[in-house]
Image: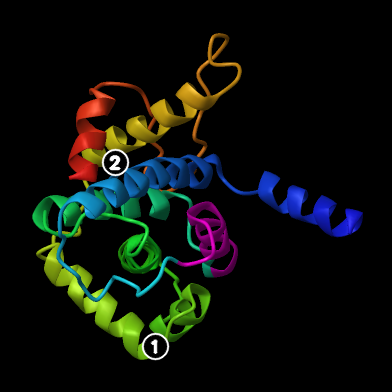
Amino acid sequence: MAEAETTNNLERETVPKVITFLSSLLQRVAESNDHIRRLQSQKISVFHGLTRPTISIRSYLERIFKYANCSPSCFVVAYVYLDRFVQMQPSLPINSFNVHRLLITSVLVSAKFMDDIYYNNAYYAKVGGISTVEMNLLELDFLFGLGFQLNVTPSDFHTYCSFLQREMWMQSPLQHLAEPSLNIGRPLKIHCCFNEDESTHQQQLAV
């Protein structure tokens, strides 16, 4: 038992910080919209499950990172896509019933757009715990929901990276000493800094 716990801790240490803090951000957004969902009706889509998945958002993202083998930058771009999707589909806010399917789909689309080498839909379906048919349907619905707006400029990347870095900085126990770095690596190699109001951005994502 102790050996398994040590192995799990070592694996988590190798996970990029962007995974940890993206999951934290999405967890808060999902919980906020879960509360709204109880107060008012929301549109049901192909991304909604009948029940909440038992796996946490963080564990799900870590699983995707471990098996999908896509670059850390893909997760920032996936975050951009998620934000664009909810802004273009305001009747489909992120909540606990759809966040997992939205995540696996956004990362799939991001990897195809960003990386030179990526796995096919059947593989992503296994990673995400869904069927290949469902994965194909989710990808198509997501692309139409985005209006096929997949291009992410360096400026866009920089802005969203700054939001994630702010999330990291706010939760760091040493935040008063230094600002941590996302260390996302290739391919855009942009220094992440703060240049916009985080609360406004989170409100848009939660709508």
Residue placed farthest to the right in the image? 2
Percent position of residue 55, x then y: 54, 63
Residue under numbered circle 1: 132
Residue at disc 2, secondary structure? helix
Instruction: Write the residue at 31% across / 51% down.
Output: 34
For badge 1, the amino acid type reads Thr
Whether the magenta-drawn stretch holds residue 62 is answered as: yes
Residue 183 vs residue 58, the one in the foreground: 58
Percent position of residue 9, x then y: 75, 48
Return the disc, 1 or 2, that comes first in the chain's sequence: 1
**Numbered disc in front, either 1 or 2:** 1
Residue 130 drawn above or below residue 10: below
Span highlighted in magenta in the image: 53-67
Residue at disc 1, secondary structure? helix
Instruction: Write the residue at 46% across / 22% down.
Output: 170
Residue under numbered circle 2: 157
Residue placed farthest to the bottom in the image? 133
Residue 167 drawn above or below residue 207: above
**Real-space CA distance between mark 1 and mark 2, rounded to the nearest whole angstrom:** 30 Å
Q: Which mark is residue 191?
A: none
Residue 145 vs residue 39, the one in the foreground: 39
Instruction: Write the residue at 50% across / 47% down.
Output: 19
